[in-house]
Amino acid sequence: MLVLGIETSCDDTGVALYDDKEGLKAHALFSQVRHAAYGGVVPELASRDHIQKLLPVIDALLQESKTELSDLSAIAYTAGPGLAGALLVGAALARALAFALAIPALGIHHLEGHLLAPKLEADAPDFPFLALLVSGGHTLLADVQGLGRYTILGESRDDAAGEAFDKSAKALGLGYPGGPAISAAAAQGHDAGLRLPRPLTDRPGLDFSFSGLKTALLQAARAQPLDDIRRAHLAYALQDAIVDTLVIKCRRALLATGHTRLVIAGGVGANQTLRDRLTEETQNLKVALYYPRPAFCTDNGAMIAYAGCQRLVAGQTDRGEFGIRPRWPLNELTPP
Ligand code: KG4
Ligand code: ZN
């Protein structure tokens, strides 16, 4: 069964081909860099770019992998959560193409894609596992028992971890997206005695809160004139605080649940300092750590093709639902 995956929930146009027997056959991504000029994603521009890029990216994917449209068994597309206009571009194209080819189309939950992305790798985790999902829009710890069987153990009450990176980078004049910019700047800095808060770590529970951290950084940034060295130290302090907070909550969740596998997913999962710290922590706890390659941490079509393929193989059928779900709580998902 060969599934075409389409991801257009935000500013990346991602496509991929996943085969249930042969695995990932090809994947391609067009990243919309023009939002950098605005310091964040402009939804209308994102939709227009998806309209322009989606068909050429699919054409190139099919050509590169020597695949004909008639080889496709199904199409999986991101139905939510995400930007309504951007989601509609992917959903409309997926539905139209599936209708023309008389094959099923499935709307996939973007976060399910992220949660399952580590399964695209050779060293794939078996169910069940604990997942730390850290992206630009979400920060949550989930108990993953199987396909569509997700329980949220804790989540952010305000900003997501990626949002804290993005907003702080903007405040420091470091550009967009903020995660890679902060981590590059932090590599030039060191612990200069500036300690930012580790929100909600001083009380029980697995929820997160990152909006106060961003304010603390802003205040520290205003306290002294900003030059490159000061920026690097502030970036270091911010990354240290975010990573520390995430590691403390992961350890707490692992001890509370007894899970022996931890999966990191979502764009912030590409952060090397987070990976290094979690590697150390999980070794101490004798827990196996899994994460996808950086390109499959950030938004991509492969995770959507994979999730769609798994659901189809498990018997899910196309219910003909066209609707997109810009807001779609993860805990509403059910097994196929
Ligand atoms: O998963 P993703 O591509 O999109 C969403 O679903 O939100 O995540 C994007 C987020 C952005 O906030 C970006 O700044 C962050 O992931 N990010 C990183 C890194 N690469 C991307 N954050 C920290 N370190 C990185 N290396
Ligand atoms: Zn995402």
Image (spheres, grey):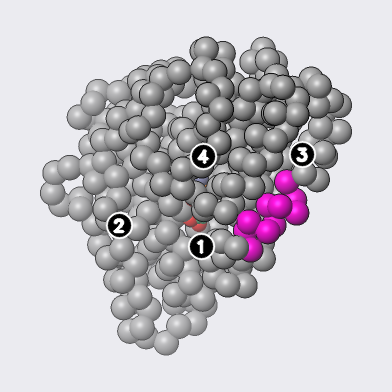
Structural distance between the alpha carbons of marks 2 and 3: 36 Å
Q: Answer with left or right where residue 263 lies relative to residue 84.
A: left
Classify residue 29 by image quadrant: top right
Q: In this view, does 15 lie above or below 312?
A: below
Residue neighbourhood size for the residue with mark 4, other residues' Cα within 10 Å, grouped as few (<14), some (14–19), many (≥20) = few
In the depicted structure, whether residue 96 falls above or below residue 307: below
Label 3 and label 1: CA atoms lie apart by: 29 Å
Residue position marked by numbered label 3 in the rendering? 58
Magenta stretch: give its range. Answer: 45-54
Q: Select label 1 or label 2 by which is in front.
A: 2
Q: Mark 2 points at which residue?
A: 158
Instruction: Identify which residue, 260 or 99, lies in the foreground.
Output: 99
Q: Which of marks 1 and 2 is nearer the N terminus?
A: 2
320 on left or right of 251: right
Amino acid type, mark 2: Asp
Give the mark nearer the N terminus: 2 vs 4.
Answer: 2
Q: Say which amino acid is labelled 4.
A: Gly
**Picture disc at residue 323:** 4
Q: Look at mark 1 in the image and give the residue it sits on.
A: 178
For mark 2, give the secondary structure.
loop
Q: How crowded is mark 3: few (under 14 residues within 10 Å), some or many (20 or more)?
A: many
Residue 229 shows in this picture: yes
Q: Which amino acid does label 3 sit on?
A: Ile
Query: How far is the residue under mark 3 from the one under mark 4?
Result: 22 Å
